[in-house]
Image (cartoon, rainbow, N blue to C red):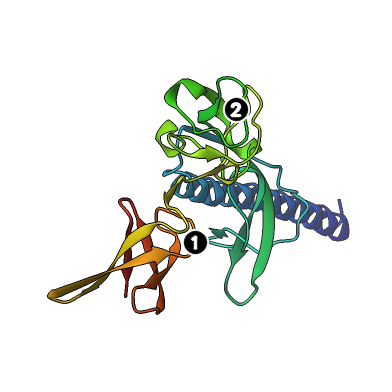
């Protein structure tokens, strides 16, 4: 075998070894990216109610990414980690890159549903509620997970049996009625001044109530149970 043939064989062997090395680096890089995304998902979903599980989408091994010692996963603006979402991964340095990995997050938790049909304007009692397991990722953000959040509130629309209750389907009952006689309190450091007045509007607990005082002045404050309106 002449020198030229041996040189060609050696070059092919070296080229093959380089390709194998490059493929190995690719597998290592993908594993690093997956670990970074999984760590982020575990930390960001730790406070969610119920049982959380997630799956990562496939990373295209053909992506031409420069080797990164510490890829950093991040949540893109406006993304919530429920249901189907995307998580970003970036690498800083002289040859930076950013990719996005599809993820599916399942949050199995208790959800409050209507035990039977609820009429519009009905005040919610404990017998009106039931609890079922559901994936929060497939439900609106305003879904109610604790029956105490619904007790005593009023249905703004008719609610079908088994329908999950949402915050926007319920309203708080009024604690002050329009025309009612109320007490206006002005609170400050070391003092409290009160006066009588009449409510201009109906307001629930924590809402703004307008009050016309005995002097004819109209003030606004926070409505509280017992006909109390606190003003600054």
Q: Which residue appears at 76% of the width and 56% of the height? A: 63
Residue 85 appears in the picture as rendered:
yes
182 or 129: nearer the eye? Answer: 182
Against 112, residue 225 (above or below) is below
Q: Which residue appears at 64% of the width and 30% of the height? A: 159
Q: Residue 93, image x and y in percent?
A: 57, 74
Crowding at dot 2, Cα within 10 Å, few <14 / some 14-19 / many 20+, comes out as many
**Disc number lying in front (1 or 2):** 1
Label 1 sits on residue = 201
Against 160, residue 97 (above or below) is below
Label 2 sits on residue = 118
In this rendering, position of residue 207 left or right of residue 11: left
Quadrant of the rendered image containing residue 223: bottom left
118 or 38: nearer the eye? Answer: 118
Q: Residue 181, image x and y in percent?
A: 35, 59
Query: Quick one: SS at disc 1?
Result: loop
Check contact, mark 1 vs mark 2: CB within 8 A.
no
Q: In which quarter of the image is the C terminus?
A: bottom left
Quadrant of the rendered image containing residue 94: bottom right
162 or 64: nearer the eye? Answer: 162
Q: Residue 26, image x and y in percent?
A: 67, 51
> For the residues marked 1 and 2, what is the alpha-carbon distance in whole angstroms?
27 Å
Q: Residue 156, image x and y in percent?
A: 61, 41
Q: Which residue appears at 66% of the width and 33% of the height? A: 158
Query: Quick one: SS at disc 2?
Result: loop
| Sequence-first disc among 1 and 2 | 2
């Amino acid at each position: 075998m002449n020198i030229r043939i041996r040189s060609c064989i050696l070059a092919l062997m070296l080229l093959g070894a380089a390709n194998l090395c490059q493929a190995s680096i690719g597998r290592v890089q993908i594993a690093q990216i997956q670990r970074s995304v999984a760590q982020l998902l575990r930390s960001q979903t730790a406070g969610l109610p119920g049982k959380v599980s997630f799956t990562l989408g496939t990373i295209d091994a053909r992506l031409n990414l420069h080797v990164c010692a510490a890829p950093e996963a991040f949540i893109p603006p406006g993304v919530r980690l429920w249901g189907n979402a995307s998580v970003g991964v970036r690498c800083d340095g002289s040859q930076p890159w950013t990719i996005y990995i599809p993820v599916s997050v399942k949050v199995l938790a208790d959800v409050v549903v209507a035990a039977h049909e609820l009429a519009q304007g009905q005040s919610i009692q404990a017998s009106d509620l039931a609890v079922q397991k559901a994936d929060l990722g497939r439900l609106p953000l305003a879904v109610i997970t604790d029956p105490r959040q619904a007790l005593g509130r009023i249905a703004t629309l008719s609610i079908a049996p088994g329908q999950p209750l949402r915050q926007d389907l319920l309203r708080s009952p009024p604690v002050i009625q329009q025309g009612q006689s109320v007490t206006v309190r002005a609170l400050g450091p070391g003092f409290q001044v009160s006066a009588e007045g009449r409510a201009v509007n109906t307001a629930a607990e924590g809402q703004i109530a307008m009050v016309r005082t005995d002097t004819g002045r109209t003030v606004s404050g926070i409505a509280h149970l017992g006909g109390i309106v606190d003003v600054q």
